[in-house]
Structures are given as C-alpha cells and as structure tokens.
Image (cartoon, helix red, strand yellow):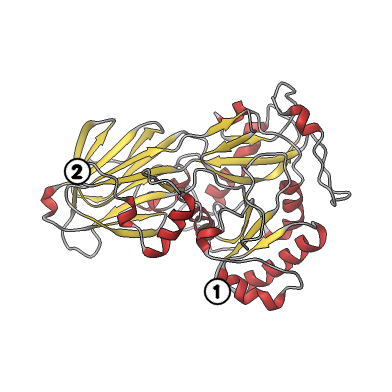
C-alpha cells in the first residue's frame, strides 16, 4: 500500500485513483455483493486501486481475480480518494471515524444493506449506475453552493467559476462510452460534523491522553505537528455516568455564558445527521441535514423542565465537569467510539465544523460529502424539493414518522 499515490484533495472534476470498499462485517451476503462490486470496478474502470481494511482483505484476497491493497488502518486515509460502504448506518459511521482526525473527508458512496439504512442513499442493485455517476461526474462545485443549502449541485453552468477553463480540458483516459456530459454531475450532501476538544483544569488540551493506543498512530499520521487537534463527530458526542449509580453533574456554558447545571444520566451534543440516532431516542428533535445547527439533548435529566435545545452551528458549548461528581470518571464516546474517562474539573469544548471552499484549488474542507441518488443536470425550481425526497421518504418509510398505533 505504501507505493500507492497519495490521496487527492476532494474536488470535481478529477478522476480518483484509490477507492476504499468498506462492508458490514461478518455478513456473508454483503461480502458476496462486495466481491461483485470490486470485480465490476476492476473490469470497467482500469487504473483504480482498491483498498480494503486488513480483516476484510484477508477474507477477500482469495475470492478476487484482481489485486487489492491493504495496510495499517492509520495509513488508509492518506491513500483513499473515495469510500464505498456496503452496510447500514453503522458502517457509514465506521467509515467517517476513519477520518475523525482529518479536516478533509473523501466522498462517500453508501449502499443501504444494513438493519435500518437511514443514511444509505443507494440500493445495491443500482451499483453500476451509482459508481458511474460519482466517478464520471465532470463538473466543479461552485463556491457559493458550499454555504447553503449544503446539497451540492455539481454543475459547471457558471462559467465565472475560476477553474472553468481547466475543467473543460479534463478527460478520463481509458474510460470509453461512460461520459455523462460536462453539465451533468453527481449530487452531494455535505453533512456537518462537530469538533470536540477536552481540557484539564490547567487549560491544557488532553485529547491525546484520552485516546486508545490503537488510535495514537492514526493521530501521528494525520497530524505531524504538536499543535492541539480536535476530534470530529458525524453523529454525536456522548457523556454518560456509565457504570456508576449516581447521576452525572456538569455545568453548561454557551458562548462563555453560564446556562445551567445538569444532573442527568448523561448529555448528547449532536449534529443534524445525528438527530435521528441516539438523540432521537433521548427525546431530541429531528433536524433536516441542511440546517446549520447542533443539538443539546439531556439523557434522563432529574429536572423534567430541562428540555432539548437546538443551537446555531457557530455556538460554542462548554461542558465543565462539576466537583460534585466526587472524583468519579464519566464515560465519553464520539460516534460510538469510547475514549478513556474524564474526571471532575475537566472541560469539554464543542463547536460546529465550518465548511471551507478554496476557489484557488477547487477543493473543500469540512463536513462529510455523501453522494446522493440521481445526477444533477443544471439547477431548477424543483432542485430543493428533489433533494428532500430521500430524507422525507426515510422519515416515513424507515422511522415510521407519526405512525398510527394498531396499524401494520
């Protein structure tokens, strides 16, 4: 794997070199479908390098007629230009965690093959069409599209875009008969993440002290400098009392202004994407992924008047662990990945991750770019409505929104 070219910066149009396929683990039919998917890419899209996680590569090696690459998980992000997930929402989160210490995340093409699949956009039967649309997308992402709504209409109708002349001359050598035209490209939804930093009583960042040994190598690869870094969460940050019988106690500040003292089983700080996960089970609001916000949801609070809050994305939330915890450690997890415990006096700082676009390079940073169903051939008045289809359909079909009792 070390001999593969380095990762390209996410931008369109530019053909990819390395794709990582990430299946739902220990599921035979998913592994069979992934084998079919890899064979198709290898046969029809020459020049692509296929990367797999070490456990998956070990299982798939003898089943494939083509070479696949693998290596330490910590070094995969530097080689991956696009991620294809085959599984449910948990598989997508596992892929997002791979880039949890990186500001730039490659596009994710997700096939819904899991238990729920609320985040998965594509059915596996459409894998040929899905891959063609994302790989052959021949368009740039205008800078203003990154500001809102966050669904990216990948169209180069706007000739004022600085890289337009460069885009006109780009081709995908070796790919014949698959072009969709320069004005027809993939649609993407940039899902916001939140940034999490933990400080001790002296105000020093201790993120590295909370990491498990297996994640420290990932950090060393992602950040060569000694400057503090932030964890990134696609779904949520969870602080919980864990195995202790007593409730967790913490003080909450919003933009350095004291809000309240929390006495509860725990607290959730969630993104709009995470609003349909743990936060929903704890009584939080369902929020559309376009909305620039973060959610604060208490878990079983002692006070019945402590209701969930929806805050602007640029709000800075500080959770300070109270001395009233009497030395107990609280459990902390980010997108389901547990960190070592935090103790009284420590502070957790949470803020929304900003989306940044560079007109000079045509690349963006921030967020998780997810490939939506259907290509986009220019803007129309129905553009926003079309983008909503998957989300609204998911609420009704998967989450059974406002589903009457007694009906099947």
Extreme-bottom residue of the structure: 62
Relative to 29, residue 284 above or below: above
Please report the residue visible at 25 percent of the width from the left and 31 percent of the height from the top: 256
Q: Earlier in the sequence, mark 1 or mark 2?
A: 1
Query: Residue under circle 1?
Result: 26
The percent position of residue 225, horizontal first and vertical second, equals 42, 46
Residue 169, by quadrant, is top right
Q: Within 10 angstroms of label 1, few (less than 14), some, or many (20 or more) residues?
A: few
Judge from the rendering whether residue 93 lies leftward or rightward of residue 382; answer left or right: left
The answer to whether any part of residue 403 appears in the image is no
Name the secondary structure under disc 1.
loop
Q: Residues within 10 Å of mark 2 (few under 14, many from 20)?
A: few
* Circle 2 SS class: loop
Residue assigned mark 2: 202
* Residue 351, x across and y down, in percent: 37, 38
- Frontmost of labels 1 and 2 is 2
Classify residue 392 as left or right of residue 379.
Answer: left
Q: Residue at x 52, y 57 (%)?
A: 89
Q: Is residue 374 visible?
A: yes
């Amino acid at each position: 794997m070390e001999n593969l070219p380095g990762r390209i910066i996410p931008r369109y149009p530019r053909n990819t070199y390395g794709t990582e396929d990430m299946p739902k683990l220990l599921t035979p039919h998913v592994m069979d479908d992934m084998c079919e998917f890899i064979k198709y890419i290898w046969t029809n899209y020459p020049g692509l390098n296929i990367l797999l996680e070490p456990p998956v590569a070990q299982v798939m090696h003898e089943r494939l007629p083509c070479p696949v690459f693998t290596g330490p998980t910590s070094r995969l992000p530097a080689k991956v230009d696009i991620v294809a997930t085959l599984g449910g929402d948990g598989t997508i989160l596992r892929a997002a965690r791979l880039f949890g210490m990186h500001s730039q995340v490659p596009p994710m093409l997700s096939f819904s093959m899991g238990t729920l699949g609320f985040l998965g956009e594509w059915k596996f039967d459409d894998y040929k069409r899905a891959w063609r649309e994302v790989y052959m997308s021949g368009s740039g992402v205008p800078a203003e599209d990154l500001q809102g709504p966050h669904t990216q209409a990948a169209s180069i109708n706007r000739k004022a875009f600085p890289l337009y002349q460069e885009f006109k001359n780009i081709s995908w050598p070796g790919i014949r008969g698959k072009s969709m035209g320069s004005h027809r490209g993939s649609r993407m939804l940039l899902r916001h993440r939140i940034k999490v930093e933990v400080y001790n009583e002296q105000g020093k960042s201790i993120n590295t002290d909370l990491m498990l040994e297996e994640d420290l190598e990932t950090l060393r690869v992602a950040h060569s400098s000694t400057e503090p870094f932030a964890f990134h969460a696609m779904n949520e940050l969870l602080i919980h009392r864990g195995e202790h019988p007593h409730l967790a106690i913490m003080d909450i500040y919003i933009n350095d202004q004291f809000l309240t003292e929390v006495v509860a089983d725990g607290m959730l700080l969630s993104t709009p994407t995470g609003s349909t996960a743990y936060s929903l089970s704890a009584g939080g609001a369902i929020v559309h992924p376009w909305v620039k916000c973060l959610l604060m949801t208490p878990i079983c609070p002692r006070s019945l008047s402590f209701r969930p809050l929806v805050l602007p994305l640029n709000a800075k939330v500080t959770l300070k662990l109270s001395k009233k915890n009497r030395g107990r450690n609280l459990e902390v997890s980010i997108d389901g990945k547990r960190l070592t415990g935090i103790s009284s006096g420590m502070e957790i700082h949470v803020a929304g991750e900003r989306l940044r676009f560079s007109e000079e390079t045509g690349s963006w940073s921030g967020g998780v770019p997810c490939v939506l169903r259907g290509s986009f051939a220019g803007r129309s008045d129905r553009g926003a409505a079309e983008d909503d289809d998957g989300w609204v359909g998911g609420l009704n079909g998967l989450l059974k929104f406002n589903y009457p009792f007694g009906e099947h």
